[in-house]
Amino acid sequence: MFRKFSVVFLVALSCVCVLAQTDITKISPEARRIHDSAIVIDTHADTPQRFVDEHFDIASVTPVSEGNVDLQKARQGNLGAEFFSIWVDPQTSAGHYTQRALDLIDSVYQQAARHPDQMVMAFSADDIVRARTGPHKRLAALMGLEGGHALEGDIRVLRDFYRLGVRYMTLTWSNTNDLGDSSGDINDPKVQHHNGLTPLGKQVVLEMNRLGMMVDISHVADKTFWDTLAVTKAPVIASHSSARALVNAPRDMTDDMLRAVAKNGGVVDVNFYSAFDDETFRKEVDAQKKEVDAATEQFIARRKAEGKPVTYMEIDHIQREYLAKIPRPPLKSLIDQIDHIAKVAGIDHVGLGSDFDGVSGALPQGMHSVADLPKITQALLDRGYKPEDIKKILGGNVLRVFRQVEAVSRGLQKGQ
């Protein structure tokens, strides 16, 4: 999977510029009214990588090609709350997962401290609502830990992350860890798997329930998913996942999984990554894989021979050169995903989990940044969705689940 923001190649930039001229969707007054009256919540953006590695200031006004999230774009798209992903690359951060996570967490706090008039740290559902109430609305900044390997096997670190403001954790990233199996390497015979959630993973899920931290099942292997639903006492989220019935990607969720999340009371937040949303795009990515892997391995070998370290962004830079060769699918592919999950799981169980600044080179046409979120509202309105249901998709469903997780936590801590 092509992940995490880096410098965009000129070929990608030229594609973006052309698309920007040809795929603009007009937003009707009704769609704008619906969108601007909603609390819009995105459950996954990888912008902290930019904060730390590129010294990016979220108040900077950047061209479309250079990033998906900044405060101006957030105002344009009426983004109310963003869950910033605390993602630790297991390859380039080996041996210091927790330290890297702490660096990323600190970077989010630093952004909020620099721009208190526009952005505020949030730790609860009520905090989100407060940030969006009154004449001076601010972006509510929350955090989700992407990958249980950042705990380094210590459940006490989970509690520390919660104290620092982390409000969901993705049990695995694309790598199997000591909590459970990942969909990203489940078919790799070189990886030792656990047949689902491990005993430590089960303890972690229950501790997340007790703390009031949402359990995120994006990225996990199928068996890990089912084990998690059997253990959890609170609704789960899929912070950035799509439907496997439409795209045959292991990261996507089957219809049975979607229905199970609905029965659990949770929410599936649709990923904007085109290889999870469009089957043609996925096949093109798969066709490139051997060539991309070979180019990456050659680069790593060369750097090692030179005695130089390898950074994730250098690897990502190579991968994006190939990704830019694939035509981006229409916005319809993303809307089809939302529509499918709404029909299978129910309107109360679908939301938005963009993966912005993590899949910048592989978004659908017309979806360049958070400023384009009103296009989703327009598309859903065009398909006959009612205003109140659109507001659920935009953020209402996530708020509900967040409140339910908080309620379960209060009950568990009281011994109920």
Image (cartoon, rainbow, N blue to C red):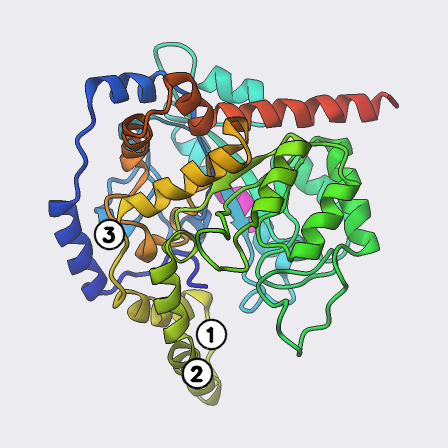
Residue at 73 percent across and 46 percent down: it is 228
Query: Mark 2 vs mark 1: which is more N-terminal?
Result: 2
Q: Position of residue 352 (x, y in %)?
A: 44, 37
Q: Secondary structure at mark 1?
A: loop
Predominant secondary structure, magenta span: helix
Tell me residue 32's x, y (percent): 26, 21
Q: Is residue 78 left or right of residue 157?
A: left
N-term mark: 3 or 1 = 3
Question: Which mark's residue is nearer the viewer, 3 or 1?
Answer: 3
Q: Earlier in the sequence, mark 3 or mark 2?
A: 3
Quadrant location of the C terminus?
top right
What's the mark number on residue 160?
none
Q: How many neighbours does mark 3 have within 10 angstroms: few (below 14), some (14-19), or many (20 or more)?
A: many
Dot 1 alpha-carbon crowd within 10 angstroms: few under 14, some 14 to 19, many 20 or more: some
**Residue 19 belongs to the span the image colors magenta:** no
The answer to whether residue 57 of the structure is visible from this angle is no
Labelled pair 3, 1 in contact (Cβ < 8 Å):
no
Location of mark 2 (residue): 303
At a point 15% along the width and 59% down the height, the residue shown is 14
Residue 57 coordinates in the image, percent (x, y): 35, 42
Residue receiving disc 3: 65
Q: Is residue 71 above or below residue 252?
A: above
Q: Which mark is residue 310?
A: 1
Q: Which residues are magenta?
A: 102-109
Quarter of the image where one finds residue 409: top right
Check if mark 2's residue and mark 1's residue have beta carbons within 8 Å: yes
Q: What amino acid type is highlighted by mark number 1?
A: Val
Note whether 366 is above or below 213 in the view shown: below
**Which residue sits furthest bottom?**
305
10 Å crowding of disc 2: few (<14), some (14-19), many (20+):
few
